[in-house]
Image (spheres, rainbow, N blue to C red):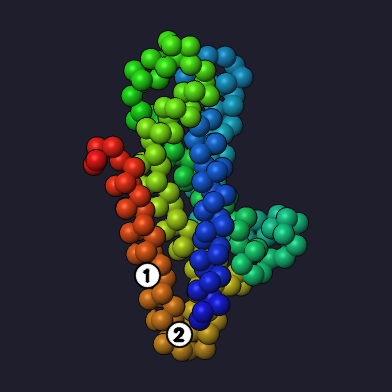
Amino acid sequence: MQQATWETIWMTALSMIIVTFVGIILGLLLFESRNKKGFGWRILNWIIAFLVNVFRSIPFIILIVLLLPFTKDLVGTIIGPKAAIPSLVISAAPFYARMVEADFREVDSGVIEAVKSMGGTNWDVIFKVLLPESTPALIAGGTVTAISLISYTAMAGAIGSGGLGYLAYLDGFQSNNNTVTLVATVIILIIVLIVQTIGDLLVKKTDKRSL
């Protein structure tokens, strides 16, 4: 049980780090390219939006199966916690990217224009306006995504990814041991509650309206 708990935490933490990085980049590209003039920008926006919508729409358990050959080539195995990372990232990054795009849209356009009028570059807009102003919303979205990843790790256990989901399925369900299933479920709930609590505290701490 201890090893399974650590595997779940490890899978969630590592995939969330990658998802945060990839999701912010994709969300930023969606935001920046949506109103840009030029054929190239429109093509870029269409391609990213298409990929985000496709991978966000595929049920996770099906996505795992579809990505088995890719996972095998990338990490060298299709079982164990390491094998679950590609599927977790590819399923959650598009979901988070859409939230990032929506968060950037909520930033006051007047502030963005003010920075540009004072000679600010696009990088200044990104690092001095978009990211700071949307930090609480990005954290809130990241919290929701992390909780989704925890549930995904449980589903990934059905095909041998390890973690509490795998323990509940193999040693609980298949062995007809309801105690194992119940304990694994309780631990997952505790992890979710901890993640939600930390996320709420960080949102409150970074939200200027609550200061």
List the residue tagged with mark 2: 180
Q: Residue at x 45, y 56 (%)?
A: 146
Instruction: Reply above or below: 24 against 8.
Output: above
| Most distant residue in the left direction | 210
Q: Position of residue 62 (x, y in %)?
A: 56, 59
In the displayed structure image, the side of residue 161 where residue 57 appears, left or right: left
Instruction: Reply above or below: 156 against 208.
Output: below
State how far apart marks 2 and 1 are (Cα): 14 Å
Instruction: Reply above or below: 73 against 19.
Output: below
Q: Residue at x 53, y 85 (%)?
A: 171
Q: Amino acid at mark 1?
A: Leu
- Judge by depth and name the residue closer to the eye, 102 or 9: 9
Q: Secondary structure at mark 1?
A: helix
List the residue tagged with mark 1: 189
Q: Quadrant of residue 4?
A: bottom right
Q: Quadrant of residue 207?
A: top left
Residue 136 visible to the viewer: yes
Q: Secondary structure at mark 2?
A: helix
Q: Position of residue 53 (x, y in %)?
A: 50, 41
Q: Position of residue 82 (x, y in %)?
A: 64, 64
Q: Position of residue 56 (x, y in %)?
A: 50, 47
| Most distant residue in the front direction | 211
